[in-house]
Image (cartoon, rainbow, N blue to C red):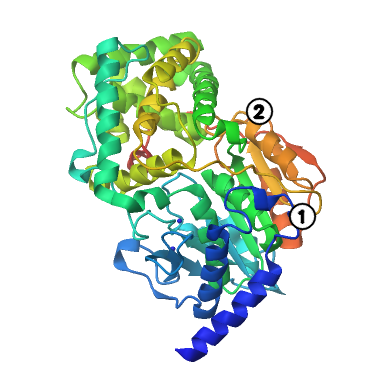
Amino acid sequence: MRTAALYTAAGSLLLTTLAAAPADSAPGLPDRPGGPGSAEFRGSVLAAARAGAAGIRFGKCAAEEELPDSVRCGTVTVPLDYAHPDGKQIKLTVSRTEATGKDPRDPEHKVPHQGALVYNPGGPGASGMFFPMIGFIPEWKRIAGAYDLVGYAPRGVARSAPISCKDPKRFFKGPTQAPMHPSEAYKMERVAEAKAYARGCAERSGDALRHYHSLNNARDLDVLRAALGEHRLTFMGASYGTYFGALYATLFPSHVRRMVFDSVVNPDPSQIWYGDNLDQSAAFENRWADFRAWVARHNDVYGLGATPQAVLRSYEKAAARLAVEPAGGKVGPGQLQGAFLQAGYYDDYWPHRAHALAAYLKGDPQPLIDQAAPVTEAAVEAENGNAVYTAVECNDAPWPTSWQVWDQDNTRLARTAPFETWDNAWMNLPCAYWPAPRQTPLDVRTGPGDLPPVLILAAERDAATPYAGALELRRRLPGSALVTERGSGTHGIAGGPNQCVNDYLDAYLLAGRLPGRSADCAPHAEPRPAARVDRSQKEKAARGA
């Protein structure tokens, strides 16, 4: 994702790991790619044994991590290619805070230590290095009392053997257009860009490019488990983290203690990743409608229209104006669309975005510039994240290689879901021209009793990972329980504003209790409108834009 006595210890651990390997508990697995009997599986067992013997030496974090002294950092070594575990090695950076042992509800009570909770925030391409800091948030203090909070940067991300596909100085283009129904000439421009980007990935990463994929992320997770000294893994994955977490559960079911899947990628092999992205574009249209309905209900504050359709006309008016004269010379229709896409992920952005749109249409472009202009200081991080995203998704599965298929599918979808369809297509189009070999997606599933009960969390109107994915994962992991936040669409609901969801999360992680097969929570409160946004809120919104 990161002399003789040591060899003896590693050899002993190797035998232990082999004995505990999930081959017996998942009898159908040997026929699956990467399952027991494969060179990659044997390599992962050996790498885990070595990591378990070496452990992780935690110390002061590097300055570039920008983490407080309370967080300690280290590295874990994994093979670049698990089929050749004695070949090139790469290091993954890891962060940790130790369990406090305190219960915020009863300060006199000493909380038993439950080991490490490892977290991945998704992406592909996102780093989890900041995760240990979440223990300072009230909603997480009970969990932080019982668990060491462990984050890490997956392979390719940040300082974990980073990859790149383009000079970061040339990554942010702006201002850009974002036609919802592009012309043929515009499509050909984007096809040429996709081809060039795919070539850049190959040129800048070479033969290593093929090894950045979800199956290796799952194997890396098992090596990290061993390096932390955990016999069984407690893991929480959000968004994309649910996908390779599900791969882990399939490959290593006997190594699982507890797992939380928050906002679930549909793991059906036929959906990875082309189908999942089409479904995502369709779902974003619904969430875009939710946002516009909210703005319309607060027309007295924003003046953008009293109906969702009127709000849409205000947005389109702004986009047309930006196409002619970009705000601040930096924000065109493409940057506008990118900023408002964030409102489809998180409803706490709604007041910020509505305020910026209203101010722009009234003659003040600064709030929109603050929220939508590219943050050039983040170019290296953004380019790296995009490179990892592209490499993982392109490597994970076959994609259509005919532009005609992409054009037909996205043209059809854009008739009913224009907001996100083409932007999503352009982001993924390098996969049509990808130079590296493709993986065969693993058929995620376990048999009854193979896997300890796991917790699935989902918001019913989540656009980034549509709700059908949570239902599909529950079907494939017998014994799992699904908690649904009804009527809500925020992406990632664990430890958020919904106390009902958080109670189920605490009950599972702290006591292993699940609500049965399913449970529902009412939606969290909608954000309150704000006629203005203070400077700190502007800066927060700009960082997320």
**Residue 237 percent location from the top left of the image:** 57, 50
Is 11 on the left or on the right of 517, as rendered? left
SS class, disc 1: loop
Q: Is residue 93 above or below residue 528?
A: below
Residue shown at the point (19%, 39%) measured from the top left? 170
Q: Give the residue at mark 2.
A: 487
Question: Quarter of the image containing the N terminus?
Answer: bottom left
The answer to whether residue 84 is visible is: yes
Residue shown at the point (51%, 77%) measured from the top left? 55
**Residue 341 percent location from the top left of the image:** 42, 28
Residue shown at the point (69%, 31%) measured from the top left? 486
Is 286 on the left or on the right of 427, as rendered? right
Q: Give the residue at mark 1.
A: 450
Question: Quarter of the image containing the C terminus?
Answer: top left
Q: Nearer the viewer, residue 385 or 371?
A: 385
Disc 1 crowd, CA 10 A, few/some/many (<14, 14-19, 20+): many
Mark toward the start of the polypeptide (1 vs 2):
1
Q: CA distance from mark 1 to mark 2?
A: 33 Å
SS class, disc 2: loop
- The mark total stands at 2
Mark 2: which amino acid? Gly
The answer to which quarter of the image holds residue 301 is top left
Is 190 on the left or on the right of 270, as rendered? left
Mark 1: which amino acid? Asp
